[in-house]
């Protein structure tokens, strides 16, 4: 069962992870963070967050592939939010095909993010 206040942030950019972590924690979420898909999958083997916010363009395994793996392991019980700086239609289509629930563009619109995050119980 997913932890209703836990959000996993997956981004290879440390500053992006820290900024998002600060916003989420101000809103009452607890956070985990990972710098790679491999690190994220290791965390997901021990804890199931209510939401994973993942960067689509990471150097090891891209966000779309990570989303596919999360869906395979956890079904639809975890909300997947992809972040991207890309404007390529292929990236959007790959995210949708992988089962991402929401796609947000960088720079992140925090107000928009807050409307789609599962509420903290």
Image: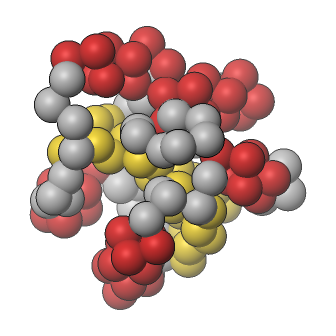
Q: Is residue 112 visible?
A: yes
User: Which residue is drawn at the image coordinates 52% and 34% (left, top)?
Assistant: 62
In the rendered view, tell whether residue 60 sits above or below residue 31.
above
Res. 66 image quadrant: top right
Extreme-right residue of the structure: 46
Q: Quadrant of residue 34?
A: bottom right
Residue 29 picture location, percent across and down = 48, 75
Residue at (25, 61) in percent of width and height = 114
Residue 23 spot, x, y in % from top left: 32, 79
- Residue 63, how many percent across, how many down? 49, 36
Closest to the observer: 13 or 95?
13
Q: Residue at x 41, y 40 (%)?
A: 57
Is 76 rendered above or below residue 42? above
Residue name at image x 19 percent, y 59 percent: 108
The correct choice, above or below, for 93 with respect to 68 in the image is above
Q: Is residue 31 left or right of residue 85?
A: right
């Amino acid at each position: 069962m997913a932890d209703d206040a836990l959000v996993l942030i997956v981004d290879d950019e440390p500053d992006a992870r820290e900024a998002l972590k600060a916003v989420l924690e101000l809103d009452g979420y607890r956070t985990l963070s990972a710098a790679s898909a491999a690190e994220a999958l290791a965390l997901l083997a021990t804890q199931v967050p209510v939401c994973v916010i993942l960067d689509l363009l990471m150097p090891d395994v891209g966000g779309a592939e990570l989303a596919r793996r999360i869906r395979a392991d956890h079904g639809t019980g975890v909300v997947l939010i992809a972040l991207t700086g890309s404007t390529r239609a292929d990236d959007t289509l790959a995210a949708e095909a992988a089962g991402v629930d929401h796609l947000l563009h960088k720079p992140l619109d925090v107000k928009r993010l807050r409307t789609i995050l599962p509420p903290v119980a």
